């Protein structure tokens, strides 16, 4: 795995050992960030949350492209170790917060994030449950963009969120959502 674009382009990332996570393939990550870039224009100064973070590749890609800050939330011990090692290798510690625990245990947000990236286990329904909770707790504001990776046959449907785009990439489906206006 490598960072695709930005300041850290080409830098290697480590993936957690074991079967606890499923790292997003480089091609899928590239497609996702192309979809986001065409809508956001720039990642500069964004506040990002990488939930079900795995190796942290999605959040680190956003930081490489100019995001100001990323919160990583992951509960798998091997994945947390990989995230911390990747953050250390990129010297990104001042722009990151790595939290060990379940996305479902997050409390109220101090303020909404600009971009929320979710990559829950396939066929878990985790994205829908997490997004409903994040909406209630103020993690999602009127301008927030949300990107979800699921299995290609899964749908993400959440009241108060509108699907802006969907794209299948191999076994994955990428869904971009926004709060209803």
Image (cartoon, helix red, strand yellow):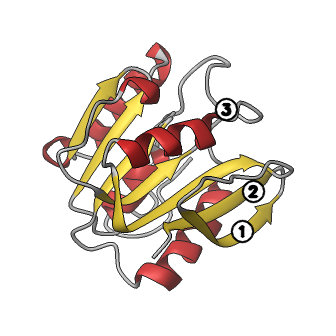
Using residue 138 as the reference point, say whether residue 73 is left or right of it: right
- Residue linked to disc 3: 121
Mark 1: which secondary structure? strand
* Residue 49 in the image: above or below residue 124: below
**Counting residues from the N terminus, which is met first, the one under dot 1 or under dot 3?**
3
- Residue linked to disc 2: 173
Residue at point 37%, 70% (across, down)? 6
Rendered image quadrant of residue 114? bottom left
Task: Residue 115: give x, y in percent of width and height.
Answer: 39, 61
Tell me the CA gap for discs 1 and 2. 7 Å
Q: Which mark is residue 138?
A: none
36 vs 80, nearest the viewer: 36
* Residue 128 in the image: above or below residue 7: above
Q: How many marks?
A: 3
**Counting residues from the N terminus, which is met first, the one under dot 1 or under dot 2?**
1
Check whether the beta carbons of the residues at disc 1 and disc 2 lie within 8 A of each other.
yes
Task: Residue 49: give x, y in percent of width and height.
Answer: 36, 48
**Counting residues from the N terminus, which is met first, the one under dot 3 or under dot 2?**
3
Using residue 119 as the reference point, say whether residue 61 is left or right of it: left
Mark 3: which secondary structure? loop
- Number of other residues with Cα within 10 Å of mark 2, as a class: few under 14, some 14 to 19, many 20 or more: many
Q: Which mark is residue 166?
A: 1
91 vs 147, nearest the viewer: 147
Query: Can residue 27 be spotted in the picture?
Result: no
Task: Residue 74: give x, y in percent of width and height.
Answer: 44, 27
Task: Residue 142: give x, y in percent of width and height.
Answer: 35, 69
Check whether the beta carbons of the residues at disc 1 and disc 3 lie within 8 A of each other.
no
* Residue 98 in the image: above or below residue 12: above
Residue at point 23%, 37% (across, down)? 97
């Amino acid at each position: 795995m490598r960072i695709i674009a930005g300041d850290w382009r080409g830098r290697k990332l480590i993936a957690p050992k074991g079967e606890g996570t499923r790292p997003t393939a480089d091609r899928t990550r590239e497609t996702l960030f192309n979809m986001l870039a065409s809508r956001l224009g720039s990642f500069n100064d964004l506040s990002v949350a990488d939930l079900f973070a795995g190796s942290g590749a999605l959040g680190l890609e956003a930081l490489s492209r100019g995001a100001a800050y990323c919160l990583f939330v992951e509960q798998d011990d091997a994945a947390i170790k990989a995230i911390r090692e990747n953050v250390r290798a990129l010297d990104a510690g001042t722009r990151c917060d790595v939290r060990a625990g379940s996305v479902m245990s997050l409390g109220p947000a101090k303020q909404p994030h600009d971009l929320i990236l979710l990559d829950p286990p396939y066929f878990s329904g985790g994205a829908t449950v997490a997004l409903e909770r994040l909406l209630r707790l103020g993690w999602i504001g009127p301008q927030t963009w949300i990107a979800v990776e699921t299995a290609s046959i899964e749908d993400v449907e959440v009241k108060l969120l509108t699907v802006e785009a969907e794209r299948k990439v191999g076994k994955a489906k990428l869904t971009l959502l926004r709060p209803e206006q």
